[in-house]
Image (tube, rainbow, N blue to C red):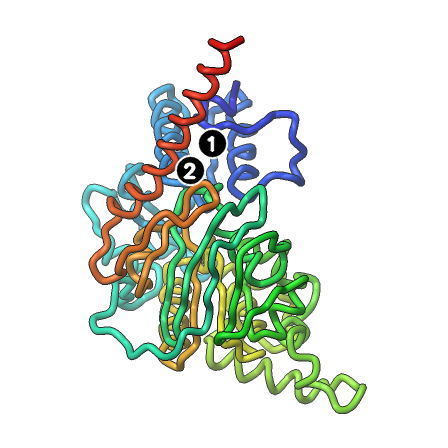
Amino acid sequence: ALIERLGVVIDPARKGADLSPAQAQIVEIAKALSRDLRILILDEPTAALTLTETERLFEIVRQLAREGVSIIYVSHRLAEIFALCHSVTVLKDGRHAGTRVVAETNTDELIRLMVGREVHLKREAGGRALGEVVLEAEDVSAPPFVESASMTVRAGEIVCLAGLIGSGRTEFCETIFGARRKRGGTIRMAGRAIDPHGPWDGKAAGIGMVPEDRKTSGLFLGMDIVNNIAATVLDKVSSGASFSNAKAEALASSFIGELKIATPHVHQIVGNLSGGNQQKVLLAKWLAMAPRLLIVDEPTRGVDVGARSEIYRLLRALADKGVALVVVSSDLPEVLALADRIIVMAEGRTVGELPGATATEEQVLRLATKFTASVADVRTEAIATGAQAA
């Protein structure tokens, strides 16, 4: 009943370990709503939710507020603050930076309180010269999540994969990388057909992948920055068969400087870093291998606006250097800010393509939902036909 109240469909008999990050987030919210609440604290509740799921959550939060529940809402997404909250308190480096009435402030003022400077998250003017085709994926299938997905990515190009949660974006990327077994279609890197049987094959082909969930799939949280970054390039930080601490430390130091990772030293345990700095370490881990194609899944989930700006700068700089980039994001303003091209997925298929320079959120959502709605109509008709025949 609680899950239905949130307006989603999740089998309550499923194990928590089998849920996607988005589904797990919804279960956490449902668990909180199961209590007789006086105060509800929501910490980044929409980080893994679709637009529809977010709107439904907002409806519930507003209803709880009308019933007298006090809501403390923690978010890095400023649009949510203005859509939902009455007042906003900004913390910076563990200290109170200011409190404002939402109706009397604006985005620029909050960003200055958060980072102490101007930050630009919007699309940059002008394009970049694109090189040869690096990735060609044609009619790729990996049932049950990927039915028929295709895309090309050129050197120096940022292609964003958009779509609703469950559309198969992550699974499509995992198939290209080799983390999920391909059952049909073709994948070519620089014109050469590849059939990765595991991430090691993707890595050998020049593909790096920053996963959606950095804590469970991307980082060794109990290890230090040095060992995390060295993990993908052990050959570069070894002397013969021996691991070279000096080489690994030098590599880590170079990325700490380049990516502006805030840490007291190179041997800081990664689990003790902030979310934004953890994400930068994860990016460094894959950049160390100098990939020709870098897949980045939800690059700014759970990071503050300052780190988000730095990650945007980094991704654009990589494209300027000729790296082909595939970015998966559920944040449509992020997609519109980064993409040279937008490929939309629904029901495990690529259903449309839009130019990043002129696309709108409405166009992306129309493509993402049009196919889903048509599939739902077909299923409903099939069920009705079957029932009538029975």
- Residue at the (41%, 59%) spot, across then down: 92
Question: Residue extending furthest right?
Answer: 241
Percent position of residue 22, x then y? 51, 41
Give the secondary structure at mark 1.
strand
Residue type of the residue flagged with mark 1: Leu
| Residue 244 position in % (x across, y down) | 73, 87
Q: Nearer the viewer, residue 374 or 5?
A: 374
Q: At x 28% / y 37%, what residue is drawn?
A: 86
Question: Dot 2: few (<14), some (14–19), or many (≥20) neighbours within 10 Å?
Answer: few
* In this rendering, position of residue 360 left or right of residue 163: left
- Gap between marks 1 and 2, in whole Å? 6 Å
Check residue 72 in the rendering and tell me which mark sits there, or answer none.
2
Using the image as rendered, state which of residue 307 and residue 289 is in the foreground. Answer: 289
Is residue 362 or residue 256 the one in the foreground?
362
Residues marked 1 and 2 touching at CB (< 8 Å): yes
For residue 211, side relative to residue 135 (left or right)? right
Quarter occupied by the C terminus: top right
Q: Please give the label number shown on residue 169.
A: none
Where residue 43 sits in the image (x, y, percent)? 48, 43
Residue 75 at x, y = what percent?
Answer: 40, 47
Q: Residue at x 48, y 49 (%)?
A: 148
54 versus 203 height, above or below? above
Q: Residue at x 61, y 87 (%)?
A: 250
Residue behind mark 1: 40
